[in-house]
Image (cartoon, rainbow, N blue to C red):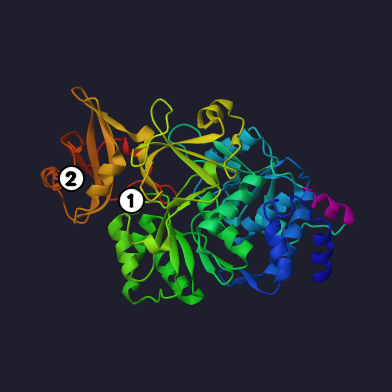
Amino acid sequence: MDTLIQHRLREVPIGADSGVRYGELIERRAARQRDRTAIVYADERLTYGELLERILLTAQALADRGVRRGDRVVCWSENRPEVLITLYATMRVGAIFTPVGIASRPTDVAYILDDLAATTLLVSDQTAGQVPEIQAAARPRILPLANISDGSFASSSTETGQRTSQGTAADTEALVVYTSGTSGHPKGVVLTHGALFANSLNTMFGLDIVSDDVTLVNTPFSHVAALNSLAVTTLVKGGTVVIDSKFDAARCLEQISEHKITSMFAVPSMLALLERAPGFATSDLSSLRWILGGGAPMPPALVARWSALGIPVLASYGLTEAGPSVSFRRTSEAAGKSDSSGAPALLTDLRIVGPTGEDLPVGTVGEVHVRGAHIAAGYWHNDVATEEAFRDGWLVTGDRGLIDEDGDLCITGRSKDIVITGGENVDPAEVEHLIVQHPKVREAAVIGRPDPLWGEIVVAVVVSDEEISLDDLQLFLRPQLAKFKIPRAIEHRTELPRSAVGKLLRRLLNTESTD
C-alpha cells in the first residue's frame, strides 16, 4: 500500500494550485497520518491510508469504465463511506460529481440525469432496485457503488494511474448540487474546485475544528451542509468522521456516547427529537464540544436548553450557492443573541440591500447579498436563473436580514415568503419566532391564504402538545406584534413537512387545512 500511495502522490506536483483540487488536501493529510482513523461506519473503520488507497483504486476503476474529464457522475445513495470515496475519485479523474439522496424518487433522478446529460450513475444496494423505474432520455452506465469503490473494477496499469492525476484549475466545475427548489424542477448549483477550497477555509476560520475532533454526520451528503461544513473539513484537519446512513434519535445518542463525538450538525427538529428520545436525560453527552445548527431558525428556548447542558448550539447561515458557509455564531455567544447567525466568515462580504439596490444602514432589514471566492459559478445550463441570482459579482440570496451593531448577520425570513395582507408586508419568520414561544406549541409555520377582502390573511400552522385556540394564540401574540401581523386563522398538523435536512417545505403547506 505504501508504494502505491507514494507513487500516486508523486504524480501531483506542488504548485500554485496545490491543494485546490477538491479532495487533494485529504490525500495530502493521508500521506502524513496514514494510520489514524479517518472514517467510521457501522463496524467498519478506515484509516487515512486505507481511505487514500480506495480513492486511488476507485479513480482507476472509473477511468477504466470510460469516465473522462468533464463527464457528469451522479451518485444515488444513502450516507456511506463509498459516497466520499467516489466523490474524491471523480475529482482525480477530472469529472463532475452530483450527490443525490436516497429520499429522491426515480422521477427526480431522471430529471437530474437528463439535465446533466450524465454518463454514469452510481447506485447503492438500497437504490439499485429502483433503477428500472428511471425514465430518462440519458442512458448512463450503471455502476454499483460498493464494487466500484472497493477496487474490484480497477486495473493497475500505469496509463490509468496517469489519467487519474491530471492538474485541476480552480475555475473547473467540481460539484453540481441540486437545490430542492420552492416550485418546479430543482436547479443544479455549480461549485468549482476553487469555490470549494475557499469554503473549506471559511469553515475552518469560522468553526473550532481540530485534529482530534470526532464528528458525526447523519444528515444526507446530498446537501452541502453535511458534506462541506463538517465531513470534508474534519478530514482536512485530520479528525475522524463517523457516518450514519440517516438520522435516528436513539441511535444518535448511542453514537455520541460510544464514539465520544465532539461535534455534529443538526437542524432544530433533530435536537427536539433527541430531547424526546428515551434515555436522553441519562445519556452521556459530555464529549460534545458544540453543535453546528442550521437549515432553519434555531428557537431560543431550544438553544438555551442545550446550553444548560454545557453544549453550545452554533447558529449559522449558509446556502447551497455559497458552498454553503456564510456566517457562524461564536461559541461564547451561543446562548445569547438568539436572532443572530453570527459574524460573516473571513472570506465573505455581505450587503443588506434595499428595494432600489441601495446599501442599508445597521439594524435595517433588507435583502442579503453575499460575495466571496466560495460562491457558486451559477446554475447548470440555466442562464435565466443565473442572471437573476448572480449580479455584478454578488449572490442575491432571496433572504431578508440585517446587520446588527456587533456586525453579526440576523436573518428575518425569505423575500418570496412575505405575506401581503391589506397592503402590509408580514415576514413569516418574525411571527413564527414568537409563536413557538407559546408553551403549548412545538413547531409553527406562517403562510398566507387568499382572502377576498385582505388579498391574503396570515395563517398559523402549528404542531402542539395540547389543543390551542385561535383566541388563545392571538391573546399571546397581541402584546408583541402589530395587529396586521397577528394570524387570523390557525391550522393544526401532526407534523410540518420538511426536507431531508429538516428545512421547512412551506410550499407543501399551501394545501387544504387538515383541521
Q: How many marks?
A: 2
Mark 1 burial class by Cα count in 10 Å: few <14, some 14-19, many 20+ = some
Instruction: Give, as a single range, the part of the protein colored magenta.
Output: 158-167
Residue at 17%, 55% in the rendered image: 466
Q: Mark 2 or mark 1: name the one nearer the start of the chain.
A: 1
Q: Which image quadrant for residue 145?
A: bottom right
- Along the line of sight, the residue nearer the viewer: 33 or 439: 33
Q: Quadrant of the C terminus?
A: top left
Image-based side of 180 in relation to 382, left or right:
left
Question: Magenta includes 162?
Answer: yes
Q: Which image quadrant for residue 247?
A: bottom left
* Residue of label 2: 480
- Along the line of sight, the residue nearer the viewer: 462 or 493: 462
Name the spot of residue 154 as percent of width and height, x first: 79, 57
Q: Is residue 392 above or below residue 92?
A: above
For label 1, the SS is: loop
* Residue of label 1: 339
Q: Quadrant of the N terminus?
A: bottom right
Three-letter amino acid code of the residue under disc 2: Gln
